[in-house]
Amino acid sequence: MQPIDRKRLAERRMLALLEDSGLPLPDEVEYGAACVRFLWLDLRVAVVVELDEEFEAADANGAHTREGITA
């Protein structure tokens, strides 16, 4: 999987997790070299998702997928 595709997949998964949990969506999403950053500006909160080799292994090993979200 190409790095940009991995970042987009991580973004979709995080946004789905937040939405399903009833939590607010971030104000901004930034792509770093090997991570995706989610920023809530008024709350001064950031979540950084680091993308390593295990990220893709989760898909290969049958990780949970949310209905309606396609990789």
Image: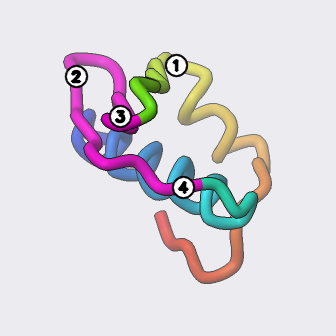
- Circle 2 is placed at which residue position? 32
Q: CA distance from mark 2 to mark 4?
A: 22 Å
**Which three-letter amino acid code belongs to the residue tagged 2?**
Gly
For the magenta stretch, what is the residue range?
24-42
Secondary structure of the residue carrying tag 2 is loop
**Which three-letter amino acid code belongs to the residue tagged 4?**
Pro
Q: Residue at x 21, y 17 (%)?
A: 33
**Which three-letter amino acid code belongs to the residue tagged 1?**
Glu
The disc placed on residue 24 is 4
Counting residues from the start of the chain, the first of labels 1 and 4 encountered is 4
- Circle 3 is placed at which residue position? 39
In this view, 13 is above or below 55: below
- Circle 1 is placed at which residue position? 53
Q: Nearer the viewer, residue 18 or 62?
A: 18
Counting residues from the start of the chain, the first of labels 2 and 3 encountered is 2
Circles 3, 4 touching at the beta carbon (< 8 Å): no
